[in-house]
Image (cartoon, helix red, strand yellow):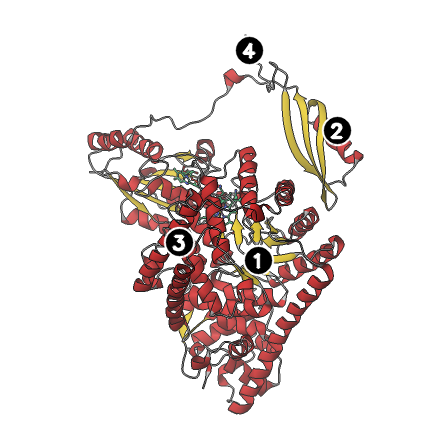
Amino acid sequence: MNDLRHIRPYGDTWDDGKVQMSFSLPVPYGEEAKEAARQYVAKLGLLEPQVVHAMDLGEEMTFFVLYAKATHAIDFTTIKVPKVESPVMDFYEINQFIKDHIGRKVVVVGACTGTDAHTVGIDAIMNMKGYAGEYGLERYPEIDAYNMGSQVSNAALIRKAKEVNADAILVSQVVTQKDVHLPNLTELVDMLEAEGLRQRLVVICGGPRLNHEVALELGYDAGFGSGTLAPDVASFIVHEMVKRQTSKF
Amino acid sequence: MQSKLGLDERQIAEARALAGQIADDVMNFILDKTTVAIERTVLRLMGLDGVDEEGIPLANVLVDQVLRNGQLSGGVSRLVINGMLQTGLSLQKLGEKVAEGELDLFSLPAFEVESLLERGALEAERALDRIKNSRQARETYLQQLGEGPQPYVYVIVATGNIYEDIIQAKAAARQGADIIAVIRTTGQSLLDYVPYGATTEGFGGTYATQENFRIMRAALDEVGEEVGRYIRLCNYASGLCMPEIAAMGAMERLDVMLNDALYGILFRDINMQRTLIDQHFSRMINAYAGIIINTGEDNYLTTADAVEAAHTVLASQLINEQLAKRSGLPEEQMGLGHAFEMNPAIEDGLLWEWAQAQMAREIFPNAPLKYMPPTKHMTGNIFRGHVQDALFNLIGIATGQGIQLLGMMTEAIHTPLIHDRQLAIESARYIFNNARHLQDEIEFKQDGQMVKRAHQVVDEASALLQEMVDKGLFQSLSEGMFADVKRTPDGGKGRDGVVLRAPDYYNPIEEALYRRLGLDMGKEVSAR
Ligand code: B12
């Protein structure tokens, strides 16, 4: 029986702890380099490290591929990951849900903000054409969707949200190198708070390096990562609106 | 050269002629206009450098003053040359004095016209001689050191810190790279000035500054001598400062520049008038400096579908080619872009990619085509990604591409780490070597799907060009014909920086460029 309270990596034998890894060390290539890599991995708490490949990168750097055995185990039964809880409905169900429970069109404003010029992600969620066979929000008869495109300032996004009396704001952030997206995402929430709009709006962020957990930490209502489709987002928005009973008539 | 795909020469010549008509329309529109960026470029080429107390480049300080004074329609040159003649100062000193508020260019008496023109011509000759010298330095290096065979192995560095970039770049050169591109930080294209000095804080790239160019150039020369191969340096002459960056690159001996006529419009929402005017001046500089330009059609396939939109790439390449010709660029300096961007789930996708790469090769036989790797369909599965890149490399060698922009298995995650690049270069060299003469062995079945695919793309591109001729480029872009992106003539960033030339507009650098490049188009606008 597999004991899910003590889990270790698996290669070809239960509990063998097999891991593969690769990294570079800033040391010149040679036997000393390989030994350094081996010792380094041993220090990480891994047993029997084997350097199976080492390569001179130039500039006194060496690249390694290693195999080793992990010693630590974790208890899988205690793992908890914050997830978007609301059930995901399809295109038809969502529109019907809006008619039944909200009774007017839901207004959504979206943008890829700051200096970020990646539009494909937010377009996938919002544009008529949609993504991977799923229509985007613009296609939903019960949703008024405004896609502002990319390189949109937080101020412009908020202005638009006020102008169209939005129910939800969608923010896309794709460039995340050196955490460039964090100040921008936090700024939006701060600005919404300052304007007293935060509670009235469902505020959502998304992008390949974002997830729900991070989004909650940043003060958003939800966060979506790679592979998200429009119904995932729309379902969350409408459930959240009903939950808050914010429907304005 | 006999077309292996049986492409119809006449049809291609007709498509070229259509693209030529579109380019002529654009030229008509741009020749009576200038931009703040062009005027700043003129100052930089004449030797103005540095920043004021607040860190604003002196080129911006001067041009902004002239603009505010409502005199930019005459160009900045007359005022500064007049200032130099009246004060006896160098342009640099003059610029500093103006920035410090010690000198007012507008209240100086006007020098006699003849001497002014003479001095302007002299400054322009000096500026262009400097570029000529750096071009000669490149040729000397190439003779002494030689270079790698095509496809050139092109990799990027993008740490954000120029000193870290140097480590990565030198390592890449040792690993086998021929071209190092220093990717710019996110957001730089929208700055209406070029930052100053060596920089260490960028996101997803490193600021393009003249000093960064200089120190990277020196590092690559050093490693090039060690490895016995000239290592080319690439950056981006794009965004709101397109011509200024071209000038800096020309002075600091960059070898390759991203320099597309449409990219900034489509992918950064820069005003189309601004970009089209700027690209002409930039490309004249690149042409004269012997810099290979790269165009950005590959990007169309990230926002539009690679199968459906393949013909838009070809149509745009033809337009880019015709615009480039009108800026004096020879075909040997036209690194037209295309890409391997089909969804990997498509049955026979490899065949179609192959057909298209071969098609591009046959339509642009003299151009060092820039072939872009899969990017959009790269995922966190780096192992599969390495295989996607391998297929891309196979096509690169089998169709004789000029510049192979190596894919990284970590494309979907981060800008390249030092070993990502190593693995990519190792794989490319393996495949290039192992299949070096594959292209000589290959013929295509004349009724096969690869030949059909190529013909279909050419047909669709021709039809699109015809439609664009009827509508004009501006209207076509407004309708989203390229990259599924819609832009209007007055929308986007930087429109304010476009100025209609007055009849007495004066730009000695432009005149000298036209002359040295043997272009005569400028006659109308520069003759007084
Ligand atoms: C296409 C592309 C571009 C195109 C963008 C064209 C356009 N108009 O969008 C161009 C060429 C312009 C570009 C430029 C740059 N790019 Co880019 N680009 C990509 C690329 C190849 C694909 C992105 C993409 O379209 N994915 C497909 C979409 C559908 O996926 P997605 O964005 O993840 O979106 C999905 C989910 O994340 C989610 N989602 C996304 N947003 C939102 C929002 C909400 C509200 C919700 C609910 C969900 C959601 O739903 C979407 C559908 O499932 C990636 C690499 C890759 N394979 O990921 C690099 C990548 C994102 N780019 C990168 C970089 C660094 C840049 C540049 C900075 C490079 C440079 N120095 O010039 C510039 C930045 C320009 C700028 N100012 O932003 C890096 C980012 C690294 C990092 N982690 O920060 C990547 C990862 C490439 C790399 N390895 O270097 N890029």
Q: CA distance from mark 2 to mark 3?
A: 59 Å
Q: Quadrant of the C terminus of chain B?
A: bottom left
Q: Seen in the image, is B417 located left or right of residue A166?
A: right
Q: CA distance from mark 4 to mark 1?
A: 55 Å
> Which residue is more in the foreground, B484 or B418?
B484
Amino acid type shown at disc 4: Asp
* Element on which disc 4 rests: loop
* Chain name for mark 2: A
- Residue identifier under label 3: B458
Circle on res. A39? 2
Q: CA distance from mark 1 to mark 3?
A: 31 Å
Among the two numbered marks 2 and 4 on one chain, the one whose residue lies closer to the N terminus:
4
Among the two numbered marks 1 and 3 on one chain, the one whose residue lies closer to the N terminus:
1
* Element on which disc 1 rests: strand
* Element on which disc 3 rests: helix
Taking B109 as reference, is A167 above or below it?
above
Q: CA distance from mark 4 to mark 3?
A: 61 Å
- Percent x, y for residue B432? 62, 45
- Residue identifier under label 4: A3
* Chain name for mark 4: A
Local packing at callout 4 (Cα closer than 10 Å; few below 14, some 14-19, many 20+) is few
Residue shown at the point (77%, 41%) measured from the top left: A28
* Chain name for mark 3: B
- Percent x, y for residue A154? 40, 49
- Viewer-side label of 4, 3: 3
Q: CA distance from mark 2 to mark 4?
A: 31 Å
- Residue identifier under label 1: B235
Local packing at callout 3 (Cα closer than 10 Å; few below 14, some 14-19, many 20+) is many
- Percent x, y for residue A219? 43, 37
